[in-house]
Image: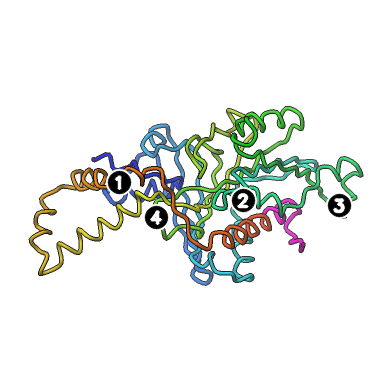
Amino acid sequence: MIEKYSVRTDLALEQKERFESDNVEVQGVVLEEDYDEEREIRITTVKIETENGAKTMGKPVGTYITMEAPNMTVPDESYHEEISEELLKHMKQFVKLEKEDYSVLVVGLGNRKVTPDALGPYVVDNLNITRHIVKEYGKYAMGEDQAHLISAIVPGVMGQTGMESVEIIRGIVNETKPNLIIAIDALAARSSRRLNSTIQIADTGINPGSGVGNHRNAITEETVGVPVIAIGVPTVVDAATIVNDTMENLIEALENSETLRGVGVVMQGYNAAEKYELIKELISPHLNGLFVTPKDIDETVKRISYTISESLNMLFSGGHAHNH
């Protein structure tokens, strides 16, 4: 099979889809799909169960749940509430807040100054932070039966702090001993239609090369010492992807057009690998490393961050929504 897996994506679902287009059954990878017609939300669970599956997929062993909701980009508050509730349902599979003083550290990865990368910091802005209150006044101060200790950090990016996010998190873990980390990050997708309308939750933490900033050391249970749940939303696509998809459509159009049939026939002579090589050569060098984001990204990232923080607030408070 040709090496066409170099177009970057952080979504396990998209990794899996590529193999499906080649009719390859990936050993050790299980896929379950579920579609909620009423809300138009598609849930795909990719479980990577074996090392072999992990190697093929280029992602660690674990569970990746993807929620696709095309209307997520629409500023409809009641629909966003439904997404928060759906997200809450899936978070509960990963996060078991069983004991009383369960402590969760929420990490908002990314760069507040770069809008498509500001998702993590924005989510933290809207969280109900309780650790200090519970520590100071006891859990009854929260007016709830079970008060979990929620703390949060926006570690910034290395250019701002001179430290890797993972170093900062490790320091915090040593001092405050959380039971769990939930890390929120902006991702890169392979397909433009998934931009800002997809949420991925994974129990494998954050692995190098993921995210918009693309500079991360791994933030996983191995590197920080406590389990890490990652929530990510693709806010950018690689420019090469767009060129690639356009070329595919062009080739298809050539093959189906009467007048241009001749050109199409020449192109048909290429196999998939050669077509891709051709495209790679044609992509101008300055397109490499160019990521593209929709023009209404400011509003969209704010809205989605609010949707995510609402579902986390409900998760931590035992299912009650808090209105700010």
- The CA span between labels 1 and 2 is 42 Å
**Tag shown at residue 284:** 1
Give coordinates of residue 280: x percent, y percent: 26, 44
Q: State yes or no: residue 88 in magenta.
A: no
Residue at the right extreme, as displayed = 137
Is disc 3 placed on a helix, strand or loop?
helix
Q: Do the numbered discs 3 and 1 sit on residues whose CB atoms are within 8 Å?
A: no
- Can you identify the residue that label 4 sits on? 191
Give coordinates of residue 33: x percent, y percent: 44, 57
- Can you identify the residue that label 2 sits on? 91
Mark 4 or 3: in front is: 4
User: Which numbered disc flags the more N-terminal residue, 3 or 1?
Assistant: 3
- Can you identify the residue that label 3 sits on? 142
Mark 3 or 1: in front is: 1
Image-quadrant location for residue 77:
bottom right
Q: Amino acid at mark 4?
A: Ser
Magenta span main SS: loop
Is disc 4 placed on a helix, strand or loop?
loop
Q: Amino acid at mark 1?
A: Ser
Q: State yes or no: residue 316 in magenta.
A: yes
Nearest the camera: 231 or 279? 279
**Tag shown at residue 243:** none
Q: Amino acid at mark 3?
A: Met
User: Which numbered disc flags the more N-terminal residue, 4 or 3?
Assistant: 3
User: Which numbered disc flags the more N-terminal residue, 2 or 4?
Assistant: 2
Mark 4 or 1: in front is: 1
Range of residues picked out in magenta? 312-324
Give coordinates of residue 183: x percent, y percent: 62, 43
Mark 3 or 2: in front is: 3
User: Which numbered disc flags the more N-terminal residue, 1 or 2?
Assistant: 2
